[in-house]
Image (cartoon, rainbow, N blue to C red):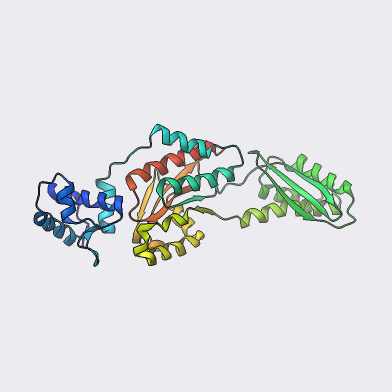
Amino acid sequence: MADPPLIELTSRAREIFRLVVEGYLTSGLPVGSKTLASESRLNLSPASIRSVLSDLEILGLLAAPHTSAGRMPTELGLRLFVDGMMQVAEPTAQERAAIERRLGQPGPIEQALEATSVVLSDISAAAGVVMVPSREATLQQMSLVPLSPGKALAVLVGDDGHIENRVLDLPADLPPAVLEQATNYITARLAGRTLAEAVRAMRSEISSGRSALDEASRELVERGLAIWSEDAARRPVLIVRGQSKLLDEGALGDIERVRQLLDDLESKQSIAQLLESARDAESARIFIGSENRLFALSGSSVIAAPYRDRDGRVVGVLGVIGPTRLNYARVVPMVDFTAQSLGKLIG
C-alpha cells in the first residue's frame, strides 16, 4: 500500500489522527473513542469517532492491539505525523542554560562526551548515545617518569589539555638517562603531530639513520607511543547511558520488545554504523522502528544529529534510542541543541 499523503485525509480525520498520536506519545497507551469524545473538542459521538478510527486503520496509520479497544499509531502513522503534523517545542532559555552548564564542566573532552550521553538520556527518558570524535588528538608533550626499578610512568598531554597516564614495564637495569633522552626526543621532534603521525615520523628517522637515539632509547620511544596508539584503537566508538530508563512502567506490558532493545544496545558497532548515516544531516534525523534493520525486532526509534567542531567539520553523532512513543516534538529540538552545545566544546 502506498503511503497516504496527509492532504488526502479530511480535516476531521487529521484531527482525530493527531489526537490519537499525541495521546499515545504522552501515555504510551492506545487511545479509545470514548476518551477522544470526552477529552477533546471534536463534538462527535463515540460511534462517529470509531468510524473515522476504522478508516485510519484501513489506511495503515493506526492499529488496534488485541488487548485494547483503543488505537495506537503504526510506524507509518508515526512517520506521517513526524514529517507532516508535529509542532516542535523549542528548549526554553532555562533548559538551554542547564544543558550548556552540564556539558561545560571543566575537564577533558571525554568527560563532556560522558555528560552529553547522560543529558540526552535525561531529556528523553530513554538511552543517550554519543559517538566518540574520530579525529586524533595532537601530541603536545609526552614524559617518561621513573617510578621504581622496571617501571616508568608515561604521561601524555594532548593539545586540548587532556592528560592521560600509563605504566610501562622496563628492563630493571635501564639507566635513568635513557628515559630522559626518550622524553627530550619526543618533545623536540614529535610535538604537534597526531600519534599516528608521530609513529610514522619516528620510524622514518630511525630507518634512514637520521635519529641520534641509541637502541635502548629508540625502543623506549616506540613502546611509549605504541601504548597510546593501541589504547586509542581499543576505545569504544560509542558511549551509551540510561539503558535502565527503558525499563519504566510502560515497558512492563511489552518486556520482550525492551529485552530485544537492550540486546541491540549491546551491539555498539552496529549502532555506530546507524548513527554514521546521520553525519551528513543538517539537523536531527529520525529513524522509526523497522525503517532501520537493527531495530526492526524491538520496534524502537532513533533520533540522531551530527555535532561539529569550531571549523564546522562533523566529528561525531549523538542522539537517543528508545521506544517509538518518544516525545518527538520535545526531544528532536533538544537533540539538535545538545549537538550544537557539544560542538562548541570541540576544538
Residue 255: quadrant of the picture: bottom left
Q: Is residue 9 visible?
A: no
Picture quarter with the C terminus? top right
Task: Please give left or right for residue 327 compared with residue 313 in the image.
Answer: left
Front one among 152 and 63 = 63
| 300 is higher (above) or lower (below) than 101 | below
Task: Please give left or right for residue 112 compared with residue 22 in the image.
Answer: right
Q: Is residue 111 visible?
A: yes
Task: Please give left or right for residue 166 compared with residue 88 in the image.
Answer: right
Front one among 121 and 108 = 121
Percent position of residue 47, x then y? 9, 57
Residue at the top extreme? 93
Percent position of residue 170, x then y? 83, 56
Task: Please give left or right for residue 79 compared with residue 208 in the image.
Answer: left
Number of marks in the rendered image: 0
Picture quarter with the N terminus? bottom left
| 113 is higher (above) or lower (below) than 301 | above
Q: Residue at the location (26% across, 49% down)?
A: 22
Q: Residue at the location (11% across, 58% down)?
A: 51
Percent position of residue 229, x then y? 67, 53
Percent position of residue 117, x then y? 49, 48
